[in-house]
Amino acid sequence: VIGVLFFFSTTILILFSHFSPNQVTLKPDEVAQRNIQSHITAVVIDEKQTQELKEQAASKVQKVYQEDKFASANTQADITDFYSSIREILGSEGEKQVSLEVLISSYINGKEDILILSSTPTQMVDYITGFNDEDLNVIEQISVDIAKGIMDRPITEETLNEAFLQAQNQINSLNYYPIARDFMKIATVSSIRPNLIFNQEATDLAIKEAIESVQPVQKTIKTGEIIVREG
């Protein structure tokens, strides 16, 4: 209501301040004591409707993303690091089980709501200690292949959880023991990352250009047209 009154108040001032000896000025909250008519035909800018169109144009601008060309390679490198750490512990002297459990837990921490596992870190350690190098090579390669397939698709921060779920669903479909699949899930989910990075600067520029492209909404006030009605 205030915006409408402001528009008509401005219109009245424009129309009457230069063309009528009886200047009329209304404040936004002031009530007109009589019908006010235009004594001329004039074109005025509807600031309120113009602003609404600018806001609509800005809201339609999509976010701009920049491709991270190294995301897929970094994901595969992280998976390799995970399995390399397991090999290093298995080939070391000393308390292997404790070290393995610490390693596995460090990958799970913070991702409990995302990872869908069927076994505990302790159970996984008991299982992996019976692996030979060939067994690790097999599940590592599967982890890399699944992660690469997921990373070949566009992934943003908003769609990252969906990518995690897709990877785990693919792993669940494999004919391997559940504990072996858990290792694959940990390796892939902890490594998959967005390959499209939100570009705030480019998005702001696109919004600015969209707003600037909106032309002012013009309205023609004809001679004798009532601008503001009494009361």
Image (spheres, rainbow, N blue to C red):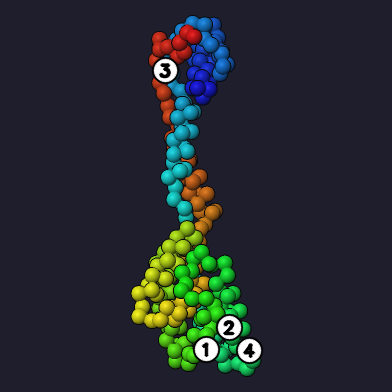
Of callouts 1 and 4, which one flags the residue occurring earlier in the amino acid sequence? 4
Task: Report if the CB atoms under discs 1 and 4 are less than 8 Å apart.
Answer: no
Q: How far apart are marks 4 and 2 (CA)?
A: 9 Å
Q: Mark 2 points at which residue?
A: 100
CB within 8 Å, label 3 to label 4: no
Distance Cα–Cα, label 3 vs label 4: 89 Å
Residue positioned 40% across, 12% down in the render: 225
How far apart are the two marked residues, 3 and 2, measured between alpha carbons? 81 Å
Figure check: 11 above or below 66: above
Report the amino acid beneath label 2. Leu
For residue 167, which quarter of the picture?
bottom left
Q: Are marks 2 and 1 in contact (CB under 8 Å)?
A: yes
Q: Is residue 110 above or below residue 198?
A: below
Determine which residue is flagged by label 1. 129
Residue 135, image x, y percentages = 44, 89
| Disc 3, SS | strand
Mark 3 vs 4, N-terminal side:
4
Percent x, y for residue 57? Answer: 44, 41
Identify the element where label 4 is drawn.
Answer: loop
Question: Circle 1 sits in a helix, a strand or a loop, which is it?
Answer: loop
Report how far apart the C-alphas of labels 1 and 3 lie in the structure.
86 Å
**Number of other residues with Cα within 10 Å of mark 4, as a class: few under 14, some 14 to 19, many 20 or more:** few
Residue 48 position, x and y percent, is 48, 28
Q: Which residue bears the numbered disc 3?
A: 221
Q: Quadrant of residue 86?
A: bottom right
User: Disc 2 to disc 1, how far (Cα)?
Assistant: 9 Å
Residue under pointer 4 = 95
The reply, left or right, for residue 154 in relation to residue 3 is: left
